[in-house]
Amino acid sequence: MLNRIDPENSQPAQIRYMEADFQVLVPGTHVVCAITGTAIPLDELKYWSPVRQEAYVDAHAAVKAEQEAGNLS
């Protein structure tokens, strides 16, 4: 289960996504999934695209992003 994020005290982080890691550019509590809009706590971030600089909440969202980008059929 994902950690709950308190909307009153949360701030989205700005991240630079790299191949095997990410770099926090502006500190925050979470990032937002590019597909679902779900807040993802930084300590639970596992899926992203360094090409599109997007985060995904889970593998299903990551696959959907690849399909939408035309990289999977």
Image: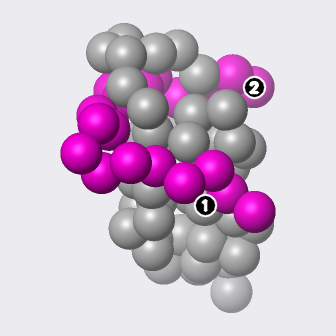
Q: Quadrant of the C terminus?
A: bottom right
Q: Position of residue 18 (x, y in %)?
A: 60, 24
Q: Residue at x 63, y 50 (%)?
A: 3
Amino acid type assigned to the residue bearing label 2 in the image: Ala
Q: Position of residue 1 (x, y in %)?
A: 75, 63
Front of the two marks 1 and 2: 1
Say which of 39 and 8 sits in front.
8
For label 1, count other residues whose C-alpha is less than 10 Å away and answer few (under 14), some (14-19) or many (20+): many
For label 2, count other residues whose C-alpha is less than 10 Å away and answer few (under 14), some (14-19) or many (20+): few
| Residue hosting label 2 | 20
Residue 52 visible to an observer of this rendering = no
50 horizontally vs 27: left or right? right
13 horizontally vs 44: left or right? left
Q: How is the image coloured?
A: one colour
Say which of 66 and 61 sits in front.
61
Magenta highlight on residue 62? no
Mark 1–mark 2 distance (CA, rounded to whole Å): 16 Å
**Magenta residues, as a range?**
1-21
Amino acid type assigned to the residue bearing label 1 in the image: Val
| Residue hosting label 1 | 57
Looking at the image, residue 4 lies above or below residue 26:
below
SS label for mark 2: loop
Say which of 30 and 65 sits in front.
30
**Which quadrant holds residue 25?**
top left
Q: Position of residue 26 (x, y in %)?
A: 31, 15
